[in-house]
Image: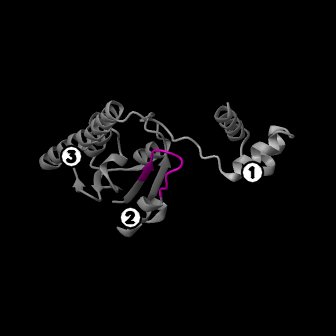
């Protein structure tokens, strides 16, 4: 009976360190911790697939939260049910053990449904907030705020007037695409 850990984040910019640390704190050896970064828009998870092909009856897969396994109830059930029927247990650190018993299956289904409802409610509240802001704030707009033209960016723009994009980007340690956006923003504000 082996204990495995699984950690996942949805974007390359996020860190796995906290999840891995929590898994180690509950006694899972580093060699048994599987981790990956993958987008929520795909269900292909090569590391998770490798882990699930390795586990057998009596093994436990530990995750920090239930949403590390799946994005929604249906997907989670498709992952959990076959493994649990083979005798694999799931230890969800913020919930407890999920195993193939009558109560375990009921708890699993309820928790998955609640987690999905919670995510849906967050999306609904966000959309309501945006709707309200559009109606009541005349200067509201979605998206990233406008870039501040710092003295560094202004100097890069001034330098660009006599040099190529590549030379300027290299001299000011910024990308060519950022430099193009800075130029466009400065020239738009002047006209």
Mark 1 — residue?
Answer: 173
Residue at figure coordinates x 36%, y 36% from the top left: 137
Q: What is the quadrant of residue 179 in the picture?
A: top right
The type of colouring in the image is one colour
Query: Relative to 182, is 108 on the left or the right?
Result: left
Q: Residue at image x 47%, y 39%?
A: 39
Q: What residue is disc 3 on?
A: 111
> Comparing marks 1 and 3, which lies closer to the viewer?
1
Q: Is residue 172 above or below residue 121?
A: below
- Give residue 14's position: percent from left, percent from top: 49, 51
Query: Which span is picked out in magenta?
Result: 7-16
Cα gap from disc 2 to disc 3, whole angstroms: 21 Å
Rendered location of residue 148, percent (x, y) = 60, 46
- The secondary element bearing badge 3 is classed as helix
Task: Say whether disc 1 or disc 3 marks the residue closer to the N-terminus.
Answer: 3
Note whether 99 is above or below 117 in the view shown: below
Work out which quarter of the rendered image holds the N terminus and state it: bottom left
Q: Position of residue 16 (x, y in %)?
A: 47, 56
Residue at image point 84% right, 38% down: 164
């Amino acid at each position: 009976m082996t204990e495995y850990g699984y950690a996942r984040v949805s974007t390359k910019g996020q860190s796995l360190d906290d999840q891995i640390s929590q898994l180690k704190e509950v006694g899972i050896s580093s060699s048994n911790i599987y981790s990956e970064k993958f987008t929520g828009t795909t269900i292909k998870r090569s590391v998770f697939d490798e882990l699930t092909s390795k586990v057998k009856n009596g093994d436990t897969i530990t995750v920090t939260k239930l949403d590390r396994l799946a994005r929604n109830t249906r997907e989670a059930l498709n992952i959990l049910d076959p493994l649990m029927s083979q005798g694999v247990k799931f230890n969800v650190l913020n919930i407890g053990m999920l195993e193939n018993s009558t109560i375990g299956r009921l708890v699993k289904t309820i928790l998955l449904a609640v987690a999905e409802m919670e995510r849906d409610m967050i999306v609904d509240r966000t959309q309501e907030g945006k709707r309200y802001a559009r109606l009541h704030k005349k200067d509201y707009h979605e998206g990233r705020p406008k870039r501040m033209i710092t003295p560094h960016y202004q100097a890069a723009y001034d330098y660009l007037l006599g040099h190529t994009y590549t030379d300027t980007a290299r001299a000011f340690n910024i990308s060519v695409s950022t430099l193009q956006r800075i130029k466009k923003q400065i020239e738009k504000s002047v006209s």
